[in-house]
Amino acid sequence: MADEPLRWDELNTQQKQILAPLKSDWNQLPQKRRTRLNRISKDWDSLPAHKKQKLQHRMQRWSNMTPEQKHAIEQRRHQFRSLPPNEQERIRKRYRWYKQLPPDRQAELREQWKKDGKSPLFPPGQALEK
C-alpha cells in the first residue's frame, strides 16, 4: 500500500483521466481517500456502467464546490463518524428511506428542513451546519 501512487503526478494516464475532476484537490485530499480513489481507478474497467456514472457525478460535484462547502461536508463526515455505531445505522436507514422517495417529495422535505434549520438525519435538536 505504501508504494501506491498517491500524488497526482505519480498517477498513470488512465487514472488521471478517471480522476480528472479531482485534479486540483488531489494532493490535499486525505491519504486514506486518495488510496481508496486510487484503488477505484485501478478497478475502473471492471465496474458496472451505473457505478462509474455515479462516481463521475460525485467527483464532478465535489470539484464544483467552494472551499467552504467542502469544509462543511468534511465537518459533517467527521461528525457522523464520531457517532456511536447504532446511531450511524439509524442515520443510514433514514437516508435509504429518503432516497426511495419520489424526487418531488425529497425536494419538499429538503425545503422544510432548510426552513426549520434541522437535519432529519442527525440526532434530535441538532441543527444543520451552514
Image: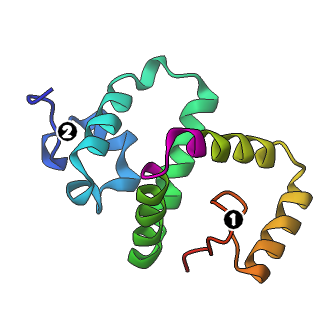
Looking at the image, how many numbered discs can be counted on the residues? Answer: 2
Assign a secondary structure to mark 2.
Answer: loop
Image coordinates for residue 51, horizontal then vertical, percent:
58, 31
Assign a secondary structure to mark 1.
Answer: loop
The local crowd at label 2, few if under 14, some if 14 to 19, many if 20 or more residues have their Cα within 10 Å, is: some
Quarter of the image containing the C terminus? bottom right
Image point 86% across, 55% down: which residue?
Answer: 103
Task: Let me know if residue 55 is in the magenta part.
Answer: no
- Establish if 6 lies above or below 66: above
Cα distance, mark 2 to mark 1? Answer: 44 Å
Which residue is labeled 1 in the image?
124
Image point 14% across, 47% down: which residue?
Answer: 9
The quarter of the picture where residue 104 lies is: bottom right
Q: Nearer the viewer, mark 2 or mark 1?
A: 1
- Establish if 36 lies above or below 99: above
Three-letter code for the amino acid on which mark 1 is drawn: Pro
The quarter of the picture where residue 105 lies is: bottom right
Image coordinates for residue 70, horizontal then vertical, percent:
43, 68
Viewer-proximal residue among 95 and 14:
95
- Establish if 128 lies above or below 17: below
- How has the structure been colored for display? rainbow
Image coordinates for residue 60, horizontal then vertical, percent:
50, 56
Majority secondary structure in the magenta region: helix
Mark 2 / mark 1, whichever is N-terminal = 2
Three-letter code for the amino acid on which mark 2 is drawn: Leu
Image coordinates for residue 122, horizontal then vertical, percent:
63, 59
The quarter of the picture where residue 108 lies is: bottom right
* Range shown magenta: 81-88
Which residue is labeled 2 in the image?
11
Image point 15% across, 35% down: which residue?
Answer: 5
